[in-house]
Image: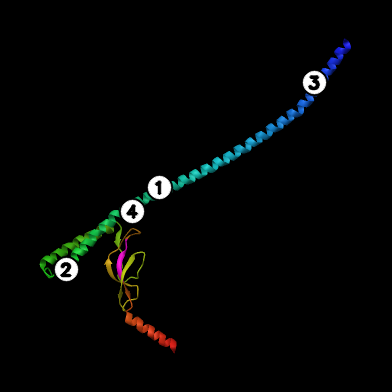
Amino acid sequence: MEKEQKENIQNENLTKEENNQSTKPQDQTGDHDKKEEENKKELTLDEKILELEDKLARTFAEMENQRRRFEKEKEDAFEYGGFSFAKEALSLIDNFERSKSILESDEKLKDSEALKKTLEHFDIIYKDLISIFNKNDIKQIDSLNKKLDPNFHQAMMEIEDDTKEPGTIIQEIQKGFTIKDRLLRPSLVGVAKKTQEKTAKTEITKENSEGK
């Protein structure tokens, strides 16, 4: 009996040792896996932080752009808020000039006192209008005897004139205006061009000189 008990105790001890040996590597492996998972979690968190930082930077940049756009729109509204009104108000000047032209060309009214007084009143009102426009930075474009500038002038016709350089404005059909640094409407103009006879003679002379 004593032998059997001793053998049993020895067997139990051996079993415990085996169990301990088998569990140790497993525990080490488990610890290693846990460390790897923790490292992965740390990397993922870093990536998330970087992603959040990028999103925040983009959001702040977009907010700054929107702020700038808003400021620009506010400035434009303040500076050019009356653009449409000013453009429509130019028809008053056009109508004044047309009315004056009609009265001046009326044969029945020519050289009459009534016409002179009417035209005087027209001139006073016209000057007042121009003065109001100037106070609000709405100014006439100086066109006559200037070179055609597509930024301010629109050529409606060519007029033969050898006394002026081709492209020089010699007639103003409709006055143009600017508001501050913007074009309100272009001047409608007629520009000079060389006469056809002179052009033909120049070409013949050129041909003759080339033939010689």
The reply to whether discs 3 and 1 touch (Cβ–Cβ < 8 Å) is no
The amino acid type of the residue labelled 1 equals: Phe
Asked if the magenta segment contains residue 41, the reply would be: no
Q: Separation of disc 3 and disc 4 at Cα?
A: 94 Å
Observer-nearest of 12 and 186: 12
**Residue type at tag 4:** Tyr
* Magenta stretch: helix, strand or loop mostly: strand
Q: Is residue 163 above or below residue 40?
A: below
Quarter of the rendering containing residue 198: bottom left
Indicate whether 1 appears above or below 54: above
In terms of secondary structure, where does tag 2 sit?
helix
- Residue at 52% from the left image edge and 42% from the top image edge: 55
| Residue under numbered circle 1 | 70
> Can you tell which quarter of the image residue 19 is in?
top right
Give, as a single range, the part of the protein colored magenta: 185-190
Mark 3 or mark 4: name the one nearer the start of the chain.
3
Q: What amino acid is at disc 3?
A: Lys
Give whichever of discs 1 and 2 has the lower sequence position.
Answer: 1
Residue drawn at (40%, 47%) of the image? 70
Residue 39 x, y percent position in the rendering: 66, 36
Residue at the spot 33% in from the left edge and 66% down from the top edge: 153
Q: Is residue 48 left or right of residue 68?
A: right
At 40% from the left and 84% from the top, the residue drawn is: 206
Q: Position of residue 167 (x, y in %)?
A: 35, 72
Do the residues under discs 4 and 1 have CB atoms within 8 angstroms?
Answer: no
Q: Is residue 67 left or right of residue 43?
A: left
Q: Mark 2 points at which residue?
A: 104
| Quadrant in the picture for the N terminus | top right
Which secondary structure lies at badge 1?
Answer: helix
> Which is closer to the viewer, label 1 or label 2?
2
Q: Earlier in the sequence, mark 4 or mark 1?
A: 1
